[in-house]
């Protein structure tokens, strides 16, 4: 069925966006505006590729557990370093968050392209592309009973563990932000850090932890894209604008990770819908690729007109905190 195949691909397309938006929501709830998410996703992807490449090159036989664990840990480590860099510059040194985020995006893309090109040379490829099919097969393992469940299995049960992990992380994040003391403290830091500081909350610690955790989650989106969506093939500049779509999804989901789950599927569907419309030329395809951004802008206009506080970003988003001015 065409519609079942479309929904399946929409979910696959949306999972990297869900990882990126969930990570950015956690970061923004602390008051940090991290526009480096596209670069962090890039670093998360290439770090996993580096780990998988080195393991494939040096192992006579791949161990299924190590084949998954090594790229996963490498991706987490690379993304964590990016989060620490951003936190040090914006929280400790109080650098401009917009400039720092954009610099991280530029650095992340350059980092990925450099090592992607280097690995392709080591693999003997003439183009800046490398294939890790063996590792990808372990990441793309689906539920064994998916094929016997008809269209439901094709749409919802034929995905890898990283896809279900993204949904679980988003749901757990929504629960923590709304129903736990940690979530309350994090939201207080993002809304009014001076008041939170006066109440005994360590503002700097919350900003560091939230940004680093958000960066790690976003980096997993890059790993999913390479190992699952792209079947283990790394290509320089292959991510496209998915990192920016993840940031747009944060606005569309009004800073709620549970809404991001459904929003990611919508954005994923809008991103590929041009493939299902016959007779479109290249110009028409590019126009349809603008749909997620157009929907975000329209939604932003609507929520701005309604002026509901729960649909607004954290009050101190993007602003540095100076304890001396409290």
Image: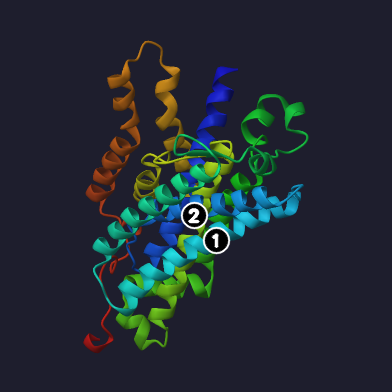
State the image quarter where residue 199 is shown: bottom left
**Is the Cβ of the residue at disc 1 closer than 8 Å to that at disc 2?**
yes
Residues at marks 1 and 2, CA–CA distance in whole angstroms: 7 Å
Residue 256 visible in the shown view: no
293 vs 64: above or below:
above
Q: Secondary structure at mark 2?
A: helix
> Could you tell whether 8 is left or right of 32 in the image?
right
Going 61% across and 48% down the picture, which residue do you hit? 162
* Residue carrying label 2: 44
Q: Percent x, y for residue 245?
A: 37, 43
Q: Position of residue 83 (x, y in %)?
A: 43, 66
Q: Residues within 10 Å of mark 1 (few under 14, many from 20)?
A: many
Q: Residues within 10 Å of mark 2 (few under 14, many from 20)?
A: many
Quick check: 3 left or right of 142?
Answer: left
Residue 256 x %, y %: 44, 55
Quadrant showing the N terminus: top right
**Vertical comparison of 181 with 276: above or below:** below
């Amino acid at each position: 069925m065409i519609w079942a195949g479309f929904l399946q691909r929409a979910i696959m397309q949306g999972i990297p966006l869900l990882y990126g938006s969930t990570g950015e929501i956690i970061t923004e709830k602390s008051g940090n505006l991290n526009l480096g998410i596209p670069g962090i996703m890039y670093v998360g992807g290439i770090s996993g590729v580096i780990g998988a490449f080195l393991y494939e090159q040096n192992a006579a036989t791949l161990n299924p557990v190590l084949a998954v664990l090594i790229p996963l840990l490498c991706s987490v480590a690379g993304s964590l370093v990016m989060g620490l860099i951003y936190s040090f510059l914006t929280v400790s040194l109080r650098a401009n968050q917009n400039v720092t985020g954009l610099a991280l995006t530029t650095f992340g893309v350059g980092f990925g392209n450099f090592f992607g090109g280097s690995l392709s040379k080591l693999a003997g490829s003439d183009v800046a592309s490398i294939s890790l099919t063996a590792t990808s097969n372990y990441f793309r393992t689906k539920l064994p009973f998916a094929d016997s469940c008809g269209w439901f299995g094709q749409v919802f049960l034929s995905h890898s563990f990283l896809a279900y992990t993204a949904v679980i992380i988003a749901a757990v994040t929504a629960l923590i932000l709304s129903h736990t003391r940690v979530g309350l403290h994090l939201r207080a830091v993002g809304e009014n850090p001076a008041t939170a500081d006066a109440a005994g909350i360590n503002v700097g610690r919350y900003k560091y932890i939230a940004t680093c955790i958000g960066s790690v989650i976003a980096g997993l989106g890059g790993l999913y894209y390479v190992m699952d969506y792209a079947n283990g093939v790394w290509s320089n500049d292959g991510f496209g604008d998915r990192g920016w779509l993840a940031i747009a999804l944060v606005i569309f989901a009004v800073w709620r990770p549970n809404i991001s789950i459904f929003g990611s599927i919508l954005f994923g569907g809008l991103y590929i819908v041009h493939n299902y419309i016959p007779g479109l030329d290249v110009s028409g395809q590019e126009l349809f690729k603008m749909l997620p951004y157009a929907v975000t802008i329209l939604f932003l206009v609507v929520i701005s007109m309604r002026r509901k506080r729960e649909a607004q970003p954290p009050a101190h988003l993007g602003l540095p905190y100076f304890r001396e001015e409290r």
